[in-house]
Amino acid sequence: MAYSEKVIDHYENPRNVGAMDKDDSGVGTGMVGAPACGDVMRLQIKVNEQGIIEDAKFKTYGCGSAIASSSLVTEWVKGKTLDEAMTIKNSHIAEELELPPVKIHCSVLAEDAIKAAVEDYRSKRGAGHSQAEVAAALVAH
Amino acid sequence: MRRELHDLMAGVCIQCGAELNAPPALCHSCGAIQPFRAELSLFDVVGLPESYDLDLQELRSQVLQLQKILHPDRFAQAEATTRRFSLEWSTRLNEALAVLRDPLKRADYLLQRQGIDALGEQVKVADPSLLMTQMMYRERLEDLLAAKDQNGLDNLRGEVEDASSKAVNKLHILLKKLPCEQVVEAGSVLRELQFLDKLLGEIDRGEESLQNL
């Protein structure tokens, strides 16, 4: 199976590989795994007081498409609000990376990982949104 | 030890009409080779009772014996239908052996017989402790390969193999009685075993790449 140039680029030069302190209250961690291929993915976001994702890191053990999908998501979420990050769909990832149908599940994994990271952050901050987020949402409307 | 197949399953010989015994590849009365039927389970194919607790030696000798009798070479001069039946049985026997001798595939097969696809492509895992452990194993493997630490790799392999045996032991308990009643738990142990299996593959590949340096 041939990988697209974009997948190869992310695979060879993955963006934002690394780890953040998962106990930091400003960090949200999402971990997901796909038993069928044995892939494990960890995606972390650092959220500032304004509710904006300042930084993102990932670590993925899996195939090129899984690495590229998570690498791409870390690029996309930087500068976004949590709500905006939650709108990322696997279809956007698959389209951007030109993933073949057999690799669509890798993009699903990356979507699940970012959602899990946002949820982890939100649950750390108490149920619902932080005040800063509510304020940001109000300004946006 | 042999399970008598249900009458309907065993059916009758296509040539002489005698009732077939398990495994239903050959008629025990006239010796005619029988058509393969899709409804036969892998256990039916090898003529062993459906169980997670398989005697692998018995499985191998049973398959070997059947392969000898059913091998297409023995039917090279026979008519086309017979040759086709023999080829099909021979292929199915190999497939059955490949699945049944593997503790992971065997458990997966038994759960699939109950309609549970624990390892499907769409299945995702969110269990934090399982994922954390897998992540740690993977990170250790990466560090050990970077350091070319063969001893460390051996230790890691040992740990992963231990974890795999523990998972297989759990499956033995969960699948002791069939159909399995704790399918959720069996599914999650099976997924853990699958992760460990893939990890062992990664350790193999990593060691190979070290040796080829």
Image (cartoon, coloured by chain):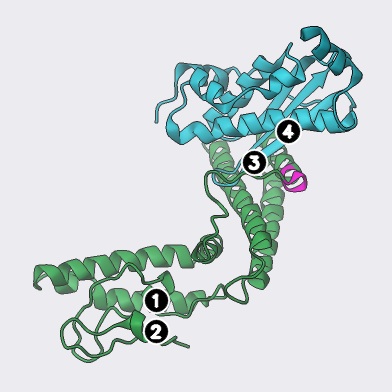
Residue at (90%, 26%) from the top-left corner?
A25
Q: What residue did someone put label 4 on?
A: A116
Q: Which residues are magenta?
A: B127-131
Q: Tell me the cyan chain.
A: A
Eye-nearest disc, 1 or 4 = 4
Amino acid type of the residue that numbered disc 3 sits on in the rendered structure: Gly
| B102 part of magenta stretch | no
Residue at (47%, 80%) from the top-left corner?
B49
Dominant secondary structure of the residues highlighted in magenta in the image: helix
Q: Is residue A55 above or below residue B13?
A: above
Q: Is residue A60 above or below residue B1?
A: above
Q: Chain of mark 3?
A: A
As drawn, the label of residue A33 is: 3
Q: CA distance from mark 1 to mark 4?
A: 44 Å
Q: CA distance from mark 4 to mark 3?
A: 12 Å
Q: Is residue B128 above or below residue B73?
A: above
Q: Do the dots labelled 1 and 2 sit on one chain?
A: yes
